[in-house]
Image (cartoon, grey):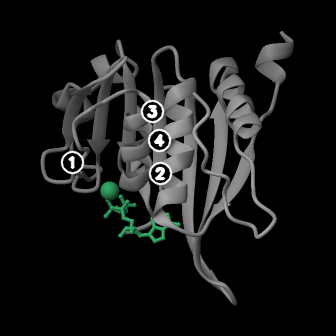
């Protein structure tokens, strides 16, 4: 009861690609059961960078590349990793015909870039991440908003926030804590 009411929305800022990948890697280390992670953000926001980091945290040895043209790629780590990119899909594509439901969620960890293209494919329990590019007097950065739906996703975001620490100069503390 309490679990389902828990809210663990979180917001993190990164200043470099490696920092976004690092947060992904920490998330990957935390994940211990199937979940769907939706990644929303403009072209070049850093969705694939984040998934690459997460795959590393899930012990995927292969290099993750963008699935934009193939719609889906599967990797093997501690869990199967399903990486979707719905950028090229439109409302006219029949989600049932695509046959993706069996992966959402399936036996593994599913990442969906451009989830807003086919919102009906997103299961009610999911971890929603919005990545937003911004510019300020220190240059370019990214804001990562995590919005968990469901008890497990909330728990994962809480654990992630506990793992992330910062240096006094505002950079992410990217030490590896094995
Ligand atoms: N703080 C940051 N976090 C992530 N990426 C960053 C950051 N700063 C700069 N970048 C750059 O932004 C780009 C992000 O590219 P990426 O392919 O991950 O975007 P994407 O959101 O997957 O886009 P698409 O919708 O085209 O798939 C990379 O070139 C990366 O080097
Ligand atoms: Mg991408």
| Element class at badge 4 | strand
C-alpha distance separating marks 2 and 4 = 16 Å
Taking the spot 24% from the left edge, 52% from the top edge, the residue there is 66
The reply to whether callout 4 and callout 3 are in contact (CB within 8 Å) is no
> Residue at 60% of width from left, 50% of height from top?
174
Task: Measure how far apart labels 2 and 1 are at the Cα level.
Answer: 17 Å
Mark closest to the chain's N terminus, 4 or 3: 4
Q: Nearer the viewer, mark 1 or mark 3?
A: 3
Judging by the rendered image, the residue that carries numbered circle 1 is 67
Numbered disc 1: secondary structure: loop
Q: Which residue is labeled 3 in the image? A: 57
Instruction: Give the residue at mark 4.
Output: 38
Q: Which residue is mark 2?
A: 21
Pick the front one: 45 or 160? 160
Q: Which residue appears at 61% of the width and 45% of the height?
A: 175
N-terminal label among 1 and 3: 3
């Amino acid at each position: 009861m309490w679990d389902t009411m828990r809210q663990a929305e979180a917001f993190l800022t990164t200043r470099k690609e490696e920092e976004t990948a690092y947060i992904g890697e920490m998330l990957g280390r935390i994940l211990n059961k199937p979940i769907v992670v939706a990644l929303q953000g403009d072209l070049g926001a850093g969705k694939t960078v984040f998934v690459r980091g997460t795959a590393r945290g899930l012990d995927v040895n292969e290099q993750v590349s963008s699935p934009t043209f193939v719609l889906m790629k599967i990797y093997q780590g501690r869990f199967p990793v399903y990486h979707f990119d719905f950028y090229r899909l439109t409302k006219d594509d029949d989600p049932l015909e695509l046959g993706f439901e069996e992966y959402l969620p399936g036996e593994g960890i599913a990442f969906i870039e451009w989830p807003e293209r086919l919102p009906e494919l997103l299961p009610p329990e999911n971890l929603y991440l919005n990545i937003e590019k911004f510019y300020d007097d220190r240059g370019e950065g990214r804001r990562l908003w995590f919005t968990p739906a469901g008890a497990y996703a909330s728990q994962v975001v809480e654990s992630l926030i506990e793992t992330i620490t910062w240096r006094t100069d505002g950079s992410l503390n990217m030490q590896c804590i094995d």
